Image (cartoon, grey):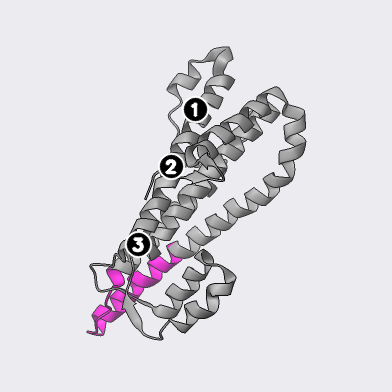
Amino acid sequence: MRDWQPVLGLPLWVWLFVVPSGLMLLCILKPDRMRRLLQPLWGVLDRFYNGAGVVAAVFMVTILLLIVGQMIARWASVTFPGSTEYAGYAMAATSFFALAYTLTHGGHIRVSIFLNLGGRHHYWLDAGAMLISALTATYFARYAIKTNLLSHMLNDRTQGQDFAPEWLLTLVAMFGTWPWNWGSLWAESGSGWVYTPVWLPQLPMSIGTVLLAIALWDYLSRMLVTGAPQIKGEALE
């Protein structure tokens, strides 16, 4: 598997790094026009970020339910196979789905020593920090997806005692296949349980890092077209 295989005739790194950077340059040169073009997307993207935050909250509650289930199973002297692994998967999903939501609500810890020393150059230092963050997040998102693909290619399975129903794997696999292949996909699916393929709990990592990268590019563009940072920290009482 090549790291930067061509997509539509151009290397993948061009689409991931050069094209977004070019859009940011347009935001600097043509802020009014870019604002009119991008503003309709802002509300849609904010809904995605908030939705990811809700999903993260659901997985956090899932951790609680799994822990309670473990306690009840221990008191009842019955086994709860895979409970530790399921809780770990839920914790990872909580962390990654919450990344973009936390960023857009100013919840990430930010070391701003150099920004505070910037004086009148504070705005451009802030924009530069956002650009570096966006490039880094995009790089990690690309390799998070590659990790998912490699796990699927190798048919990597869990080393624990956790299982997943085959119908769930088929349902998730539908999103990675063309609709006309769904019939054969379900025809090959069974009704039993199998050891959890590693790509399944890795999906939140890929989705979360992709959303984080999109959020960083998104809020960098908002900053450039409005002339002010758009990430506001939540007030703590």
Circles 3 and 1: CB atoms closer than 8 Å: no
Contact between marks 2 and 1 (CB within 8 A): the answer is: no
Label 2: which residue?
A: 4
**In the displayed structure, would residue 20 be above or below residue 164?**
above
| Residue 149 image point, x, y percent | 39, 57
Eye-nearest disc, 2 or 1 = 2
Is 153 part of what is drawn in magenta? no
Residue hosting label 1: 129
- What residue is drawn where x is 35% and y is 81%? 193
The picture places residue 70, in percent across and down from the top left corner, at 30, 74
Secondary structure mainly formed by the magenta segment: helix
Amino acid type, label 3: Met
Q: Residue at x 49, y 64 (%)?
A: 58
Which quarter shows the C terminus? Answer: top right
List the single residue furthest toward the front.
9
The secondary structure type at the circle numbered 2 is loop
Mark 3 residue crowding within 10 angstroms, few (<14) / some (14–19) / many (20+): few
Span colored in magenta: 60-84
User: Is residue 146 positioned above or below 233 on the image?
Assistant: below
Q: How many labels does the image show?
A: 3
Whichever of callouts 3 and 2 sits on the residue coming sooner in the sequence is 2
Measuring 39% from the left and 65% from the top, which residue is drawn there?
200
Q: Name the quadrant containing residue 222.
A: top right
Which amino acid is tagged 2? Trp
Q: Is residue 80 magenta?
A: yes
Whichever of callouts 3 and 1 sits on the residue coming sooner in the sequence is: 1
The numbered disc on residue 114 is: none
Secondary element under disc 3, as helix, strand or loop, is: helix
Kindly report the distance in space between the C-alpha atoms of the residues bearing marks 2 and 1: 25 Å
Tell me the tag on residue 153. Answer: 3
